[in-house]
Image (tube, coloured by chain):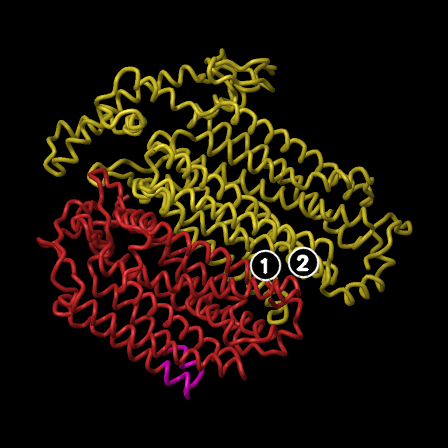
Amino acid sequence: MELDVVELSRLQFAMTALYHFLFVPLTLGLSILVAIMETVYVMTGRPIWRQMTKFWGTLFGINFVLGVATGITMEFQFGMNWAYYSHYVGDVFGAPLAIEGLMAFFLEATFVGLFFFGWDKLSRVKHLMVAWLVAIGSNFSALWILIANGWMQNPVGAEFNPMTMRMEMTSFFDVVFNEVAQAKFVHTVSAGYVTAAMFVMGVSAWYLLKGRHIELARRSITVAASFGLASAISVVVLGDESGYDAGLNQKMKLAAIEGMWETEEAPAPFTLVGIPDQEDRETHYAVHVPYVMGLIGTRSLTEEIPGIAELVEEAEGQVRSGIIAYDALMTIQEQMQDTPADVMETFEQHSDDLGYAFLLLRYVDDPRNATEEQIVMAANDTVPHVWPMFWAFRIMVGIGMALILINGYFFVRSSFKGMDYPRWALRLSVAAIPLPWIAAEMGWIVAEYGRQPWTVDGILPTALSVSHLSVTQLLLTIAGFALFYTVLFVVEMGLMIKYIKKGPTQDVAVTDEWMAKHEHRLRTHDGNVPEFTPAE
Amino acid sequence: MILHELISFELLRVIWWGLLGVLLIGFALTDGFDMGTGALLPFVAKTDTERRVVINTVGPVWEGNQVWFILGGGAIFAAWPPLYAVSFSGFYMAMFIVLCAFIVRPVAFKYRSKRPSPTWRSTWDWALFAGGAVPALIFGVAVGNVLRGVPFHLTPSLMPIYEGSFFGLLNPFALLTGVVSLSMLIMHGAAWLNLKTEGRIQSRARRYGFTAGVVAIIGYAVAGAWLLLITDGYSFVDAAVTDGPSNPLMSDVVKGGSWLAAYGARPWIMIAPIMGFVGMLMALRGLTSGGEATTMLWSKMGILGVISSVGLTMFPFILPSSTDPDSSLTVWDASSSHLTLFVMLVATVIFMPLILMYTSWVYSVLWGKVTEDDVTANGETLY
């Protein structure tokens, strides 16, 4: 019964988080692209750039609002579905979340209204400032949420307090400058930038294929391709940085991604493809690339990366040590401040492994009564399911590489080839619109599914983190969210498509008039007569 | 890090108790008029143009206002983790309904004007109505239950176990406080529309707002009498340890006696209910004959008084447990650690003044009435 609540709570969290993350990456990147376009407008005074700002701004708004709406669920779900987690780590995890509200949400939400409503009420420069504040606010919110998330992956700057039965912060500095959090932040926002760049490029390519809104589309591609190329490179490089950090902090996650069952001799090979088999602890039909894994994971030729079998053995030792901590903790719970000094000392020696004793709660009510067999089972539980990790990672990386190529190609064409794009490239760019989203969702799976069986790595098992709810309650809310979110998704897609088909509708007359007047010097096509009909 | 010991743990807890109040009041004062306006929408505005006028009075600001709610949640998580864990999981289904309302409301604001079809628009109008009225009611119901005590206990490992049901929340006293909350926010929304609109909408808003205000005042008086004369209060058995570890199980609490005792021990807190009554009465007067901006201010004062009277009456209790009083959460045993409270205070001291500054700037840019001419002339940029 308990287990069902755990599985359902995980399902609901995964569902709402993955859904929320359909909207966030586009918000992160498009807010900046729109601000860049408006900057060009303010600097040059050319109305076409204002038209671009408003057009992409409209699409930004349709997307933004669902990011906001579904983000509220994320903020409240911890308390609703993960009550013991909230109690256990709220002292550390809550702070970045609250600061996110103070520093980021207020900024973006207060100014986003003015961005849409303030065109006539503000001077050009002030409106531009508003656009940038929205972009900065959105990106700050990613910073703080990833500091919170980074702490779940690599819990630094905190220790367990037996008096309050929870983790308490010992250094705010360590929590904020957690290297995992920093790498994740840059990796994630870069992914958002690529998403937006691909979106702008794809939609613009579609206009070019249809021969509509040529001027807007060409300029949009130019901005998007250079922004997208820089970001796509940054995603992959900083993804590698995350890989390196995973090597230091989450060895098990790295081993699962790699499907590396046994410790390999350094430098370990990278398995390009294969079929991981959890039961036999073997990856069938594996194709290896020598040295690469060792380089990513350790940045050396001599250091070994531990395989899954070795890590499970290590975990078994930690479960045993955790049982000692648990035993001492029970004494402390009874005697509180009157606990004898030697019990306190024993506890402190073993408290780092306390979380491993909690893994036994799945099998036995009191970890102290665990059998040898149960200890082995608990240690085995520290291995995440390998094949989803293995494949999610490979899909993500493959898409990342493809996006570098696509953005690079368009960057070259827009900068050095007079913005002349072959039709196959335009078609490819339209077809590639969904790719960054797929990669982002896969990235979430690698990071969070790969964290299992823990909510906070090595500290608190997922099974212990949930609220005391009934299966019926969870089924009701899961059904509710599924229904509600599906309707919203259909509505959102409908509006997006409608507004993309409609094209820019604001400032059309003034832009066209200006374009006609300056056509002779603005021709974007090598001085030849443009082969497409101009924007309607 | 020893910097945080500059402010004692006890004082930090009191400050964060106060800041919790500031956030809840900030939410009620700003998002409160959004919710009230939403609840009034189908009634004060009949034609599409009228409805667009009403929606556009809050159109540019609801998003920022809603952050008070999100920040409230985040700050409870960070500063009062046990409160966050117990209340959000305990009021599970009620929270789910609130979430749905807060999800549908932004979407309704943003998407309503994107298609001209009357069915499309009227669907979103009712979504805005529900998105305003339902949370306003539920928040009041929640407060009523908190005042009565909530059926939960904590295990020795401090896992919160909620023993009640969703329908248990709907007891007569809590329903009454729900009505007070709803009617008070409708009055507040009417005061906002009184300030931001003119003509027919304005006169309808005044009429509905007046009725709502009368209900709020009577309801508040009845609820107050009920609470102080009939409902059981909670108290510590021994003098509370104010700077001990945040473990609610370490103190003994009894149910019984009356919340009225607070007014004997701290007579000055009378000021809160007085502000509540005076503010709401003056707002009523304003809705019939007073100045538009001052009516809004009186309404704000009324809400400030009503909400702070709840907190001040219960102090130091935050969430009493009706079935296991020892598990009750109080200011002295349900906070974050000394360091976390300090860090959060520093963040608040830096960012809260900035937030107030730029929010005021945005409101000043948007100052003035929204008219039917505005919305018909600016079809593209407005909602």
Whether residue A472 can be seen here: yes
Picture coordinates of residue B91, whole percent (x, y): 33, 52
Q: Is residue B118 a member of the stretch shown in magenta?
A: no
Q: Quadrant of residue B145?
A: bottom left
Q: Chain of mark 1?
A: A
Q: Is residue A223 above or below residue B361?
A: above
For disc 1, the marked residue is: A131
Q: Element at badge 2?
A: helix
Give the chain coloured red. Answer: B
**Nearer the observer, A399 or B131:** B131
Residue A53 tag number: 2
Q: Are marks 2 and 1 in contact (CB under 8 Å)?
A: yes
User: How crowded is the residue under tag 2: few (<14 C-alpha within 10 Å), some, or many (20+)?
Assistant: many
Amino acid bearing label 1: Ala
Chain coloured yellow in this rendering: A
Name the outermost residue toward the bottom.
B289
Looking at the rendering, the stretch of residues picked out in magenta corresponds to B283-297
Compared to residue B46, the image places residue A23 above or below, namely above
Query: Is the N terminus of chain B in the top left, top right, bottom left or bottom right quadrant?
Result: top left
SS label for mark 1 = helix
Residue that lies at the very extreme toward the top in this rendered image = A265
Amino acid under disc 2: Thr
Badge 2 sits on which subunit? A
Please provide percent x and percent y for residue A480.
47, 48
